[in-house]
């Protein structure tokens, strides 16, 4: 049986969750329900948003007013914040921000609308079967797949202690003001928040919180794993921390994609060959988006 | 009753079930696309470019969306000839579609060596000579913009491929595309493939830098369709018709209507590229749409549509 395909999903909800984040809920039935029920945290789907309406002029943020009318051609990739199989249907939740003309249009999707979806795509995070502690680090819109991962670890590796770190520039830019925090705490994950301006949680970078936590919780490095999803600058620091402490680390990379399934070769991620200085380009969509942090050559200017 | 409609074509001596091809570089080596579309529904399949040695390709960003189109600067990233033969050819052998290998290289010798190595592969219908890639420093488009060079490389590769079909893929970034097509045909090309992408760029106004790491890229997608259509019609009228050489036409095709426009303009077959990124099964839908059109318009053979533009 195929493990991915092109499906029509029905929108069951699409709401603004915080200053920055929207939450889209899609319902799949038939083959789509079966395939998405098996979707792993860190995998993604390509949504066709070309035919979505624009919001009314007063609802278009100033920074998008100039580009809002641009016609969308390519699909846009989104990872999942939650996947729930119920009977013969599967609900997929996507946490997103309106950052460009396509995601701006995405905000107008309404209950009952039909969306063409390719997926599930990519590899997803591995589960920490041989670890006792998992450190999950989310920056900005990277929060979605980290929430999904926390839930999957809890379900599939119940003995693993989950520690979640969520970073954002300000309180308003945190993803979970209304719903996400509850989900994590009721899930039993210890959650630490950091904002650049200190308006919520700790003041400073989320990676500093991770470093402090690792210094205070010196369990054997071999028993801990770090998972990261967020801006490349954050992932780079995480990779450096993990390397220095000898801790396994998986990062979810982001690239502009055209196809999402490996044919356009657009989403190149530079990777070291067996730890040497020689590098190759792997495909973020097909070989990733989750990579072992050790193999990535992070972009210096990000 | 669409199943009764025959849309098979003779393409430079090879019979194809229908006139729809996947374009090189938009369908990999078939394995990825087969998750979404039955490749046996295609007439022809053209692989991603193959070079003698593996090529790493360009740094990211390699692609950027533009209005009704996209730029790419992949840089002929590919697994190289030996790995292609070992890993990919066995998969391609299983398809009923005619398989063409897209050849690229830095020198005429490299093109010839790769062509020779593959010339006896029974599962291949032929080759597409890529002398029009805008995204590499050596080779690529540099062979495709000068009629003398085009003739030289076409003759050398035709000799290497023997009985197999040799299509020459043209660049639109030339003053007179008919002149290039004529040079290729007179040097032995069995078919003309047109078009490769248009050299283009996109700029980030915040940083004042090109968006693509390669600075420039190739424009594809619906944005180029009207120009590609015009160029196919021009080459058909000025060159291909006279020499009775088929054209594989394309550029921004995403529907059966688009495909039929190219056939009316003079194409014997059509190639679908960028649209497969958005709707990976669109080639199969285009095949069905062409059948429906032929049925509706009572077209007995799709070949009677080629170059049937009423002027």
Image (cartoon, coloured by chain):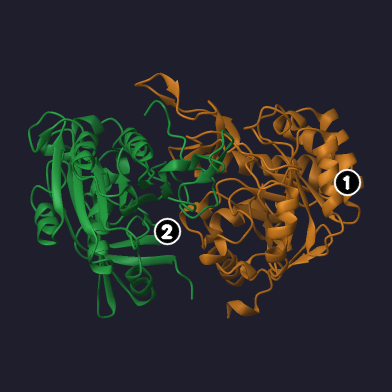
Please give the chain letter of the residue carrying mark 1. Answer: B
Q: Residue B22, how many percent across, how many down?
A: 62, 56
Left or right: where A63 falls relative to B123? left
Chain for colour orange = B
- What shade has chain A been given? green
- Above-or-below relation of A274 to A278: below
Image point (22%, 62%), residue name? A151
Which mark lies nearer to you, 1 or 2?
A: 2
Q: In the rendered view of the protein, which quadrant contains the C terminus of chain A?
A: top left
Q: Which residue is mark 2?
A: A121
Image point (59%, 77%), residue name? B2
- Above-or-below relation of B83 to B284: above
Q: Secondary structure at mark 1?
A: helix
Left or right: where A1 falls relative to B204? right
Nearer to us in this view, B309 or A139: A139
Q: Quadrant of residue B174?
A: top right
> Within 10 Å of the Cα at label 1, are there few (<14), some (14-19), or many (20+) other Cα atoms?
many
Nearer to us in this view, B179 or A270: A270
Q: Residue A109, how many percent across, how many down?
A: 23, 55
Image point (31%, 66%), residue name? A9
Q: Secondary structure at mark 2?
A: strand
Q: Which residue is mark 1?
A: B158
- Above-or-below relation of B58 to A263: above
Nearer to us in this view, A237 or B5: A237
Q: Residue A232, how many percent across, how many down?
A: 35, 36
């Amino acid at each position: 049986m195929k493990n991915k395909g092109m499906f029509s999903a029905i929108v069951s909800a699409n709401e603004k969750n915080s200053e920055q984040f929207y939450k889209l809920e899609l319902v799949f039935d038939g083959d789509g329900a079966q395939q998405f029920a098996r979707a792993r945290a860190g995998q993604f789907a390509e949504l066709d948003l070309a035919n979505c309406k624009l919001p009314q002029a007063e609802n278009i943020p100033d920074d998008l007013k100039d580009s809002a009318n641009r016609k969308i051609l390519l699909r846009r990739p989104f990872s999942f914040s939650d996947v729930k199989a119920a009977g013969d249907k599967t609900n997929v939740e996507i946490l997103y921000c309106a950052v460009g003309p396509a995601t701006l249009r995405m905000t107008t999707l309404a209950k009952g609308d039909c969306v063409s979806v390719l997926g599930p795509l990519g590899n997803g995070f591995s589960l920490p079967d041989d670890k006792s502690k998992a450190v999950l680090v989310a920056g900005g819109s990277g929060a979605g797949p980290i929430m999904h991962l926390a839930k999957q670890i809890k379900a599939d590796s119940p003995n693993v202690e989950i520690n979640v770190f969520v970073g954002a520039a300000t309180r308003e830019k945190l993803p979970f003001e209304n719903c996400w925090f509850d989900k994590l705490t009721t899930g039993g994950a210890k959650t630490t928040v950091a904002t650049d301006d200190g308006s919520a949680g700790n003041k400073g970078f989320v990676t500093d919180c991770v470093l402090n936590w690792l210094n205070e919780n010196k369990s054997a490095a071999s028993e801990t794993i770090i998972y990261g999803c967020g801006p490349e600058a954050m992932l780079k620091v995480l990779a450096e921390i993990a390397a220095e402490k000898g801790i396994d680390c998986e990062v979810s990379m982001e690239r502009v994609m055209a196809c999402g399934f490996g044919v356009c070769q657009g989403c190149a991620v530079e990777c070291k060959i067996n730890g040497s200085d020689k590098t190759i380009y792997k495909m973020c969509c097909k070989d990733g988006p989750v990579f072992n942090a050790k193999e990535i050559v992070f972009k210096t200017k990000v | 009753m669409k199943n009764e409609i025959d849309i098979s074509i003779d393409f430079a001596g090879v019979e194809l079930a229908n006139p729809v091809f996947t374009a090189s570089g938009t369908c990999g080596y078939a394995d990825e696309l087969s998750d979404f579309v039955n490749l046996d529904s295609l007439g022809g399949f053209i692989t991603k470019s193959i070079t003698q040695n593996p090529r790493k390709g360009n740094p990211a960003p390699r692609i950027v969306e533009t209005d009704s189109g996209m730029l790419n600067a992949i840089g002929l990233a590919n697994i190289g000839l030996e790995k292609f033969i070992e890993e990919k050819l066995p998969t391609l052998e299983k398809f009923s579609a005619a398989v063409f290998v897209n050849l690229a290289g830095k020198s005429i010798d490299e093109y010839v060596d790769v062509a020779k190595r593959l010339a006896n592969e029974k599962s291949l219908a032929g080759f597409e000579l890529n002398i029009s890639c805008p995204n590499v420093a050596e080779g690529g488009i540099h062979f495709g913009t000068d009629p003398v060079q085009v003739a030289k490389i076409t003759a050398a590769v035709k000799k290497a491929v023997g009985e197999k079909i040799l299509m020459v893929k043209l660049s639109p970034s030339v003053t007179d595309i008919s002149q290039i097509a004529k040079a290729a045909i007179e040097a032995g090309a069995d078919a003309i493939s047109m078009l490769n992408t248009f050299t283009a760029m996109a700029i980030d106004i915040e940083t004042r830098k090109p968006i693509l790491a390669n600075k420039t890229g190739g424009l594809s997608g619906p944005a180029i369709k009207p120009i590609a259509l015009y160029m196919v019609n021009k080459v058909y009228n000025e060159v291909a018709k006279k020499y009775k050489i088929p054209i594989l036409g394309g550029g921004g095709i995403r529907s059966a209507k688009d495909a039929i426009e190219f056939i009316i303009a003079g194409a014997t077959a059509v190639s679908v590229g960028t649209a497969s990124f958005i709707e990976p099964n669109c080639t199969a839908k285009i095949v069905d749409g062409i059948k429906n059109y032929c049925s509706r318009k009572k077209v007995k053979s799709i070949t009677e549509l080629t170059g049937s533009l009423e002027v």
